[in-house]
Image: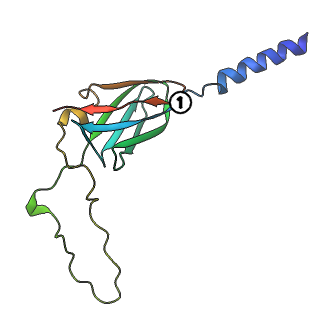
Amino acid sequence: MFTHARALVALCAFCAAGCGSGTSTVSGTVAFGKQPLSGCTIALYCSDQQILHTRTDRSGRYTVENVPAGPVRVTVQARRQLPFELRAPTVPPALPKGEGPIAPLADPDEATVPIPFRYAHPEESGLVLVAGPARVTFDIALSP
């Protein structure tokens, strides 16, 4: 009888600690109007004070793993397109012999859509999700 009680206590402790680790994977898409936004930075402000970041791919998809369970405020920031006079020339200058190619300064596929500034602030974005012990899908449709 004593060993059964110990086994039951051990099983309960194991389930409390390991069954449902208290984190989830959050994924979804980001779009402005009907246009998917690539190269956006997604930040998740978790209830335990962690801030988790990721970027959207070319289709506007993102995934963040190990998000603690609880309420999460979300922000979206898009890289703004530079004014014409500040842009790098489209054809790089000639390189001395033996030099390798120069990496581009920015990915031309990254978002250049001017999304409203409010989406960059966790208190103003209005984007909130509740992370649980499973996978969470959170699609973000931004509006002007």
Across and down, in percent, residue 135 comes to 50, 30
- Side of 42 where 80 appears, left or right: left
Q: Residue at x 89, y 16 (%)?
A: 3
- Side of 131 where 45 appears, left or right: left
* Residue at the disc numbered 1: 23
Outermost residue on the left side: it is: 85
Q: In this view, does 81 lie above or below 94?
A: above
Across and down, in percent, residue 75 comes to 30, 34
Question: How are the residues colored?
Answer: rainbow
Secondary element at image label 1: strand
Q: Which residue is drawn at 44% across and 40% down?
A: 63
Across and down, in percent, residue 72 comes to 39, 27
- Side of 54 where 87 appears, left or right: left
Across and down, in percent, residue 104 comes to 28, 67
Q: Which residue is drawn at 15% across and 63% down?
A: 87
Q: Residue at x 37, y 42 (%)?
A: 61
- Side of 13 where 137 appears, left or right: left
Q: Is residue 128 above or below residue 93?
A: above
Outermost residue on the front side: it is: 34
The amino acid on which the numbered mark 1 sits, given as a three-letter code, is Thr
Q: Quadrant of the N terminus?
A: top right
Outermost residue on the bottom side: it is: 97
Q: In which quarter of the image is the C terminus?
A: top left
Judge the density around disc 1: few (<14), some (14-19), many (≥20) Cα neighbours within 10 Å. some
How many numbered circles are shown? 1
